[in-house]
């Protein structure tokens, strides 16, 4: 049990469910394409639309980083922050809501507002509701379009995947897509089963999205480096092959411990990282598949 305790604690901190020292975090800015930039700091990657209409951001990391995020946006000379889009409810993507939400409207899927209002349970741990300032004031069930900075920015709900409130954001003219945590580039993802996430649903989402993407698309993952279709295809291959392995072993009557002891083929070794190592990923897949039994 202790083997899994540290990765789980680190994961909870990353998702905004614990304490973290943000004093040394630097916000790095990368131009992606067209009007779109990516900010990398601590937590989920931020997408930014900059242009004559002002600034729109996708996700806002943690509240203690708000001043640093604001400074990074200021360097883009885009004027006033006009909109915030949340890709899902986790604290490493919505923590800044309580700061920026006092200045500009927040948009998100209906389930994001619900979970931020109600809080959540993680084992014996209770995640309290977010303050009212952090709640999305504009919600939608399927999709919403914002016509901003000379392009249509479409947020589309793809259920279920990382959670039951995920949206993927398409910057249609810039050929950029912010995937949220439906895409962890080059690494095993966290699928939040307690928040309605589902591994097989995530596979279906990635298959659907890939069919819609132009070859020159730039992808902002929830976590990991700026990517393209190749990286998303590799991610889909990993999801499908590792899930198929676990499903086969479950049909053979193997327990989770036996599946973890056997592990995965060597080619997936480098997908393990400090928050989701191989054992943790196998546990997520096992528990997700077990729900459907």
Image (cartoon, rainbow, N blue to C red):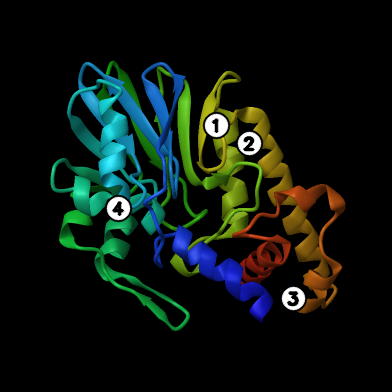
Q: Nearer the viewer, residue 211 or 286?
A: 286
Precedes in sequence: disc 2 or disc 3: 2
Q: Nearer the viewer, mark 4 or mark 1?
A: 4
**Left or right of 31 in this view: 56:** left
For label 1, the crowd category at 10 Å Cα-Cα, with few meaning under 14, some 14 to 19 and many 20 or more, is some
Q: Is residue 34 above or below residue 109?
A: above
Residue at 19% x, 63% y: name it. Answer: 131
Position of residue 257 measured from the top left corner of the image (x, y, whole percent) = 77, 78
Q: Secondary structure at mark 1?
A: loop
**Left or right of 275 in this view: 130:** left
Q: Is residue 129 above or below residue 137?
A: below
Q: Which residue is mark 2?
A: 232
Q: Nearer the viewer, residue 198 or 64?
A: 64
Q: Which residue is mark 4?
A: 64
Q: Which mark is residue 138?
A: none
| The C terminus, quarter of image | bottom right
Q: Quadrant of residue 114?
A: bottom left
**Left or right of 104 in this view: 119:** right
Q: Which residue is mark 3?
A: 256
Dots 2, 1 in contact, CB < 8 A: no
Residue at 85% x, 54% y: name it. Answer: 265
For label 2, the crowd category at 10 Å Cα-Cα, with few meaning under 14, some 14 to 19 and many 20 or more, is many
Precedes in sequence: disc 2 or disc 1: 1
Q: Secondary structure at mark 4?
A: helix
């Amino acid at each position: 049990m202790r083997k899994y305790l540290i990765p789980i604690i680190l994961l909870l901190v990353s998702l905004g469910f614990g304490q973290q020292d943000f004093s040394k975090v630097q916000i790095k800015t990368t131009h992606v394409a067209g009007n779109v930039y990516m900010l990398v700091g601590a937590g989920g990657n931020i997408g930014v639309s900059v242009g004559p209409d002002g600034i729109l951001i996708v996700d806002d990391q943690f509240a203690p980083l708000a001043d640093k995020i604001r400074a990074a946006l200021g360097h883009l000379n885009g004027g006033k922050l006009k909109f915030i889009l949340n890709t899902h409810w986790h604290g490493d993507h919505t923590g800044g809501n309580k700061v920026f939400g006092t200045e500009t409207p927040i948009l998100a899927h209906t389930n994001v507002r619900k979970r931020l209002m109600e809080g959540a349970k993680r084992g014996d741990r209770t995640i309290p509701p977010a303050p009212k300032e952090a709640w999305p004031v504009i919600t939608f069930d399927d999709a919403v379009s914002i016509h901003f900075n000379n392009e249509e920015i479409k947020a589309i709900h793809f259920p279920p995947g990382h959670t039951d409130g995920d949206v993927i954001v398409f910057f249609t003219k810039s050929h950029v897509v912010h995937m949220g945590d439906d895409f962890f580039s080059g690494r095993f993802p966290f699928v939040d089963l307690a928040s309605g996430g589902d591994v097989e649903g995530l596979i279906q989402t990635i298959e659907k999205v890939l069919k819609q993407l132009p070859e020159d698309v730039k992808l902002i993952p929830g976590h990991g480096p700026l990517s393209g279709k190749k990286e998303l295809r590799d991610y889909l291959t990993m999801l499908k092959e590792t899930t198929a392995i676990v499903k086969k072993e479950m049909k053979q009557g193997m327990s989770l411990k036996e599946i973890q002891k056997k592990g995965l083929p060597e080619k997936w070794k480098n997908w393990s990282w400090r928050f989701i190592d191989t054992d943790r990923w196998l546990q997520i897949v096992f528990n997700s598949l077990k729900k459907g039994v």
